[in-house]
Image (spheres, rainbow, N blue to C red):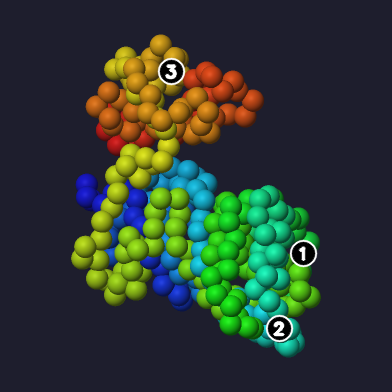
Amino acid sequence: MNKFDNKVFVIDKKSGPTSFDVVEAFRDVMGLRRVGHAGTLDPLAEGVLLLCAGRATRAVEHFVDLAKSYRFDVRLGEGTTTFDAEGEVTSCVPCPDLTREQLLEATKSFVGETILEPPAYSAIKKNGRRLYELARAGETPKVEGKKVKIHSFEITGVDLPVVGFALSCSRGTYVRALARDFAARFGLPCHIRNLVRTAVGPFRVEDGFPSDRIFRGDVDGVKGIDLSDALGFLPAIVLSEDAKHGLMKGVVPGQADVVKTIGSPAGARALRILDEAGVLLAVGKRAEGTERNRLSWVDSYRLLVDERGVSA
């Protein structure tokens, strides 16, 4: 078996290729059969791109759910078709002499839950087609705004008409849409000049393997993270040996089957299911409407081993 299979990789994506380009190049150069990514980055964007190989692809949704952090610069007064530097300029107006206090006040208004309408050039699907495909065909379908959570939105520098930002947010936050709505508070068009995803949950850009080396076929030093370790941000339950074999046959464990807990499983949306040796058996996910103090919600799980206790 390929020693890099069934692992998670932190990649530092460089500007230019799409996320799928990175996936394809990584799969080919590493000799892996199945690779997926946990959260798309635009071609212009750089930073953390998590890749999952083999059975680790079964846990992609849990990495996608993690909070994201970004650094980016916005050019106020100049709008583009894509709200980034790759688009064609659509409008250009003078940027007023905004004070730092005015800019800070605008950022504060976005912190917490907010509604963002995805930009026309995005990967969201409408009637089975990507929005960017429709936009390129001259169509502008109406897309409902999406509720996201902005944990923090800070100004890192002001050199008008350019403003630098640091952002921490929930999944599904389109940074270009946030920049658009921020500039709209001052009646201005804008576009993002550059964008770096600095973190996805506990995974940091400084720990990422440069994507440009992957395209050159230079993967010396690339490191994979065991799935159980990569999912360490999730709480866990440890099952007895009998319950382990029952789980692999489709029997949902009960409280009496748990010999140990790690973290706080009772209030979690998802958790790791381990055997007594610490081997990751499955990832459980809470079904809507189930009681928070019972294990019955583990009936929604992705099994990661087969009945012989080997990788599925």
Question: Of the residues under marks 3 and 2, which one precedes in the sequence?
Answer: 2
* Quarter of image, res 86: bottom right
* Residue that label 3 marks: 253
**Foreground disc of the pair 3, 1:** 3
**Rendered position, 203 above or below 191:** above
What amino acid type should be assigned to the residue bearing mark 3? Pro
Q: Secondary structure at mark 1?
A: loop
Question: Of the residues under marks 2 and 1, which one precedes in the sequence?
Answer: 2
Q: Secondary structure at mark 3?
A: loop
User: Which residue is at a point 45% across and 15% down the rendered structure image?
Assistant: 254
User: Which residue is at a point 58% across and 64% down the rendered structure image?
Assistant: 154
Q: Secondary structure at mark 2?
A: loop
Packing grade of label 1 (10 A; few <14, some 14-19, many >=20) is few
**Foreground disc of the pair 3, 2:** 2
Do tag 3 and tag 1 residues touch (Cβ < 8 Å)? no
Question: Of the residues under marks 3 and 1, which one precedes in the sequence?
Answer: 1
**Rendered position, 247 above or below 43:** above
* Residue that label 2 marks: 97
> Visible in this render: residue 27?
no
| Residue 83 percent coordinates (x, y) | 65, 75
| Residue 51 percent coordinates (x, y) | 39, 55
What amino acid type should be assigned to the residue bearing mark 2? Asp
Q: CA distance from mark 2 to mark 1?
A: 35 Å
Count of labels in the image: 3
Packing grade of label 2 (10 A; few <14, some 14-19, many >=20) is few
Q: CA distance from mark 3 to mark 2?
A: 63 Å
* Residue that label 1 marks: 141
